[in-house]
């Protein structure tokens, strides 16, 4: 199948946004969030300095770490690239799909939110990675990628023109059940970001990395409990589709597998001294899980009666 220009652009934009979330997880896991201590510049310059000796006088040379600086700087460059791609996607939606409001307004909303997300990125640096602002930063990123997924899905969905062959209908409860699971997963991700923020605070105050999780307390237990609630929800949803012999059962299995993988990586982090690779995977799978849930929700809405 030959893709239309908007379909190609929407796919690239959505995939690049997922890549940005992955890189953002890498920034957090490596401790590079303050690799550039100011925003939007890096050590007062648009191009990072080559050495500590070339820093402007207002910056402490002890803050200069080339690895962390370039990790954060490349994250920002990727963020700018995603912003430009979303802008191009919104323009393309206006050109090719202005009479399809679901596509047009989803891309416009994503574009407006990406500007807000950039501003939030500056607040993250200004507040020195405060947990609440980092949580807001992640939630907005997830909302943006969900909007892009929605627009991409609609771009590939056939435009209703003539009566189509009847399909096996799903029960109208399906979209509601999946929407509830999406909200639970989003809530669990928000708690996870709060847990990570408390861990970073503990490490920065001198707590050993393998003991930092123990300082989080009840918040971590809520995060873990919600992970199992999401797993139970994914299991029940899979059984629900299985008993109805639904063609959507494959997506339900994907969601169940991602929920299991998410918990497995959480266990690796909890008992493996917060291995950075597991942290990156944990966040990436969380975003993919929400994406799979969103796709299943969209598919179920089209097949509901």
Image (tube, helix red, strand yellow):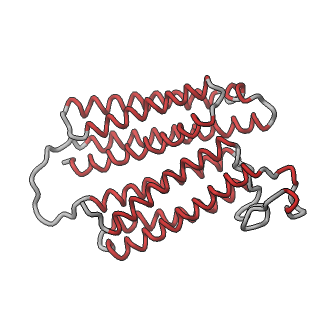
Q: Which quarter of the image is occupied by the N terminus?
A: bottom left
| Residue lying at 49% horizontally and 40% vertically, measured from the top left | 286
Residue 25 left/right relative to 172: right
The spot of residue 109 in percent (x, y) is: 46, 64
| Residue lying at 14% horizontally and 44% vertically, measured from the top left | 168
Image vertical order of residue 113 relative to residue 34, above or below: below
Residue at the right extreme of this rendering: 57
Residue 88 left/right relative to 7: right
Residue at the top extreme of this rendering: 271
Image vertical order of residue 1 relative to residue 219, above or below: below
How many marks can you see?
0
The spot of residue 290 in percent (x, y) is: 43, 44
Along the line of sight, the residue nearer the viewer: 118 or 72: 72
| Residue lying at 34% horizontally and 69% vertically, measured from the top left | 5
Residue 51 left/right relative to 173: right
The spot of residue 283 in percent (x, y) is: 54, 41
Kindly indicate the quadrant of the structure image that contains residue 88: bottom left
Residue at the front extreme of this rendering: 50
Kindly indicate the quadrant of the structure image that contains residue 105: bottom left
Residue at the bottom extreme of this rendering: 95
Image vertical order of residue 179 relative to residue 199, above or below: below
The spot of residue 241 in percent (x, y) is: 25, 34
Along the line of sight, the residue nearer the viewer: 188 or 7: 7
């Amino acid at each position: 199948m030959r893709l239309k220009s908007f379909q190609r652009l929407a796919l690239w934009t959505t995939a690049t946004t997922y890549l940005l979330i992955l890189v953002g997880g890498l920034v957090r896991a490596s401790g590079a969030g303050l690799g550039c201590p100011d925003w939007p510049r890096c050590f007062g310059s648009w191009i990072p300095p080559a050495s500590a000796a070339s820093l402007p006088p207002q910056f402490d040379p002890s803050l200069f770490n080339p690895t962390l600086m370039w990790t954060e700087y490349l994250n920002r460059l990727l963020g700018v690239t995603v912003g430009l791609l979303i802008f191009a996607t919104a323009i393309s939606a206006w050109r090719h799909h202005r009479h399809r409001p679901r596509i047009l307004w989803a891309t416009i909303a994503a574009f407006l939110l990406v500007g807000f997300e950039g501003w939030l990125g500056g607040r993250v640096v200004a507040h020195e990675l405060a947990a609440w602002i980092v949580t807001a930063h992640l939630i907005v990123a997830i909302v943006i990628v969900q909007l892009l997924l929605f627009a991409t899905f609609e771009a590939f969905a056939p435009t209703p023109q003539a009566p189509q062959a009847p399909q096996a209908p799903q029960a109208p409860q399906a979209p509601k059940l999946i929407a509830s699971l999406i909200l639970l997963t989003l809530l669990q991700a928000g708690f996870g970001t709060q847990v990570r923020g408390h861990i970073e605070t503990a490490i920065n105050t001198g707590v050993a990395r393998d003991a930092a999780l123990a300082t989080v307390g009840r918040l971590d237990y809520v995060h873990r409990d919600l992970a199992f609630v999401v797993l139970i929800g994914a299991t029940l949803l899979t059984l629900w589709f299985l008993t109805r012999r639904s063609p959507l059962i494959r997506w339900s299995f994907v969601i169940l597998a991602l929920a299991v993988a998410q918990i497995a990586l959480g266990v690796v982090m909890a008992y493996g001294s917060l291995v950075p690779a597991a942290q990156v995977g944990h966040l990436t799978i969380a975003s993919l899980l929400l994406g799979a849930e969103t796709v299943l929700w969209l598919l179920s809405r089209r097949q509901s009666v």
